[in-house]
Amino acid sequence: MAATATGIHHRSYTSELRLRATRAEYFRLGLMTVLLLILPFVLDNFWLSQANLILIAVIGAVGLNILVGYTGQISLGQGGFLAVGAYSSAILSDRIGLPTPLAILVAVLLTAAVGTFFGLPGLRLKGLYLAIATLASQMIIEFVIRRWDWLTLGQGYLNVERLNLFGFQIGGRQVFEQQWYWVLLVLAVLTVLTARNLFRTGLGRSFMAVRDQDIAAEAIGVNIPRAKLTAFAVSSGFVGLAGALTAHYSEVVSWEKFTLDVSILYLAMIIVGGLGSIAGAVYGAIFMTMLPELIRQLSLGLGDTLPFLADELPAVRNAVFGLVIILFLILEPRGLDRIWHRIKDYFRYWPFRY
Amino acid sequence: MSARTRSLAVAMAAASALVLSACGGGGGGGGADSDEAIPIGIIADLTGATGDVGKPYNEGMLAYVDWRNEEGGIEGRQIEAKSNDYAYEVPQAEQLYKQYVNDGVVAIQGWGTGDTEALSGSVSRDELPFISGSFAEPLTDPEEAPYNFIIAPTYSDQMRIALNWISEDSGGKSDVAVFHNDSPFGEAPVADGKNWIEEEGLELGYEAYPMPSGSQNFVGLLSQAKDQGAKYIVIQNVASPAALVAKDIAAQKLDMKIVCLNWCANELFIESAGPKNAEGHVLVQPFAPMAADKEGHQVIKEYAEANGIDTADIGTSWVQGWYAMDVMAEGIEAALKNGDDLTGTAIREGLETMGAIETGGVVGDGSVEFSADSHRGSTATGIYRAEDGKMVEIEDGATL
């Protein structure tokens, strides 16, 4: 565990349970708030679109981390659950005519239900076996969205109307990214806060108990099946929200966006960010979403000296993607979150080593 | 640092950020100034699943831009084409699209069906004309996709023409197996083909088989087609997998004839399969290959000679790229001639109202024409047969 700051004495349980205890933490929170508030004014539309993708990824990655990082239930079904959220929200709002916020809410509940259903094997299976079972859920959902023609009325894809939130309509090319940024920022912050607080409740702690030692957890009275299924429900709910937002933000839903690659990308996000850490899921989402674009910018910059980078860009991207995961697994399995803690500790104890 | 100085620092940071933000923003947009370059974004597949034909298509487009700029550009303005590889992955295409929009391009050249469809909504909201390598039928309807333009007969039209041809070739009765890429591109004409048989009362059996991507042979699929009794295999895929099917048919000594649609109906198919294995197979290709030596090929030949390119290396996909860019350039020219600001809406109007664009016999029956009611540029296609390693024309400008 990271060291706690010296000189802090808690005199009540509430004080001990506070999310932030030191001034430095409040200071960083303030800085981050300022940063998030000014981003849409300093970034151009392209980089803002990247920020929007990151915010959606944050919601999805936090959702997955609840399941994998906190409850220890490996899932390869992320792409499928994103698809459930996306298709259901698009169909409910555009075809059935529900107001979009309501459609998104129903999509979240529906994805939670589907997630719980596919979580059932988790009651009997663990580790690799569960991973393969959830892989099956990915395959089944992918099959459904590809082959059930009525989902897209035989068109193969769904066009989604521009988002309308309580009468507020998202605008055109110039303001589109900026307006979406605010919507996504609010939802991402709410997601992070909810997840962060979840693990201060009994339910959240029962998830961690299942992860750490399920037999011991059962011995102290945790209802294991309930905890596991709730974890699947809560996690898929978040993922469903990310899926629904993907649909409304990109304004088109097609199966090609929800393949196994997406599941693997999200797993990579939480591994690189740090399993079992909400902040880690956020760091991972930022890092893995930015990585391809940064490589592209790099290849453009080095186009003259290293032309093969630009010529083989997609291959280079895949190679770097693999390499990053391997390096993290070897050098820092606890991810960016742990690296950040180490940096903080270094400054906190300086000039002493510990 | 005390709490007060810290809050002061935060407040300062906020203030300076607001100042910064006031400086940022603004700008962008393609102006009407007469000598500014015209920015066009290209979303190309150079290394992805359809890279075998995507790469020459991209080269053809860039060659056209090069040629046109040498000729003085469009109404005295140079074309600035930005081309990037998206490796046939929809999320990458979306990313590139966002970047092009941000860069202020006035039109976009796309590629695959999945990504063109995925972007069609954004394209119409952002009012950016979009021509792509995909000829899926829903993209021709201005109600559905008001900014998408299709310069050749749709995959469905090509399928209908192929089925008519098969019906005639077989003497009225036969069985057809459709091998298609397992993607929106491959699936695009499948249902329309089935409907066509019913509408026209053709006596053709019809069964569709998705081709698993990355397959090293298609013997399994061929044996299914054989059980079905298929004598004709219509292939809706790119050249490399289609060539594998041709090889397998030869190896298994099956009595089957391939009818390739568009993206496998090219020299690359014959080359990859080997002239012997390709012999006799039929190619439905709306863009005349160089071998057909149409009037519209002359300009390409001259460009190739001047730039040291061997015309023997110029395949049909390359020609397609050239003419896709040509059609877009004609639309831009029409918009500028109308005296409009160079916006997406003006280019769209130019394309819709300029009348027929002559391609010197290369595309369809020679001309591409759009209207406000239809973005289906052409309905005619050439039909070729592979003979001695060459594409030999058996029908010119075939229509329904």
Image: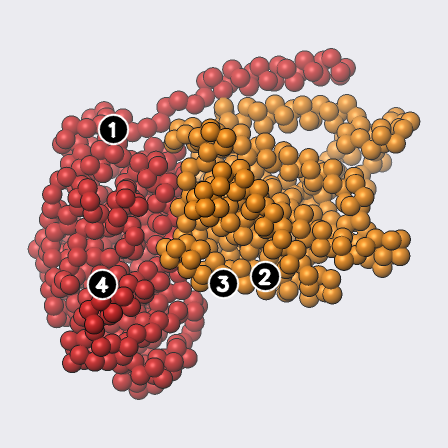
Chain colours: A orange, B red
**Seen in the image, is A224 located left or right of residue A325?**
right
**Seen in the image, is B290 located left or right of residue A1?**
left
Q: Quadrant of residue A273?
A: top right
Mark 2 touches mark 4? (CB < 8 Å): no
Residue at 62% over, 45% down: A238
The image position of residue A61, as x and y in percent, is: 62, 45
Q: Are marks 2 and 4 on the same chain?
A: no
Name the residue that disc number 2 marks: A137
Element class at badge 2? helix
Residue at 79% over, 56% down: A224
Which-is-in-front pick, marks 3 and 1? 3
Disc 2 chain ID:
A
- Marks 1 and 4, how far apart in space? 40 Å
The image position of residue B2, as x and y in percent, is: 77, 15
Element class at badge 1? loop
- Of the pair B104 and B170, the residue shown nearer to us: B170
- Marks 2 and 4, how far apart in space? 37 Å
Say which amino acid is labelled 2. Answer: Ser
Disc 3 chain ID:
A
Element class at badge 4? helix
Q: Are marks 2 and 1 on the same chain?
A: no
Say which amino acid is labelled 4. Answer: Gln
Element class at badge 3? helix
Is residue A332 visible to the viewer in this orientation of the structure? no
Q: Are marks 3 and 1 on the same chain?
A: no
Q: Are marks 2 and 3 on the same chain?
A: yes
Which-is-in-front pick, marks 1 and 4? 4
Name the residue that disc number 4 marks: B158
Name the residue that disc number 3 marks: A143
- Marks 2 and 3, how far apart in space? 10 Å
Position of the C terminus of chain A by quadrant: top right
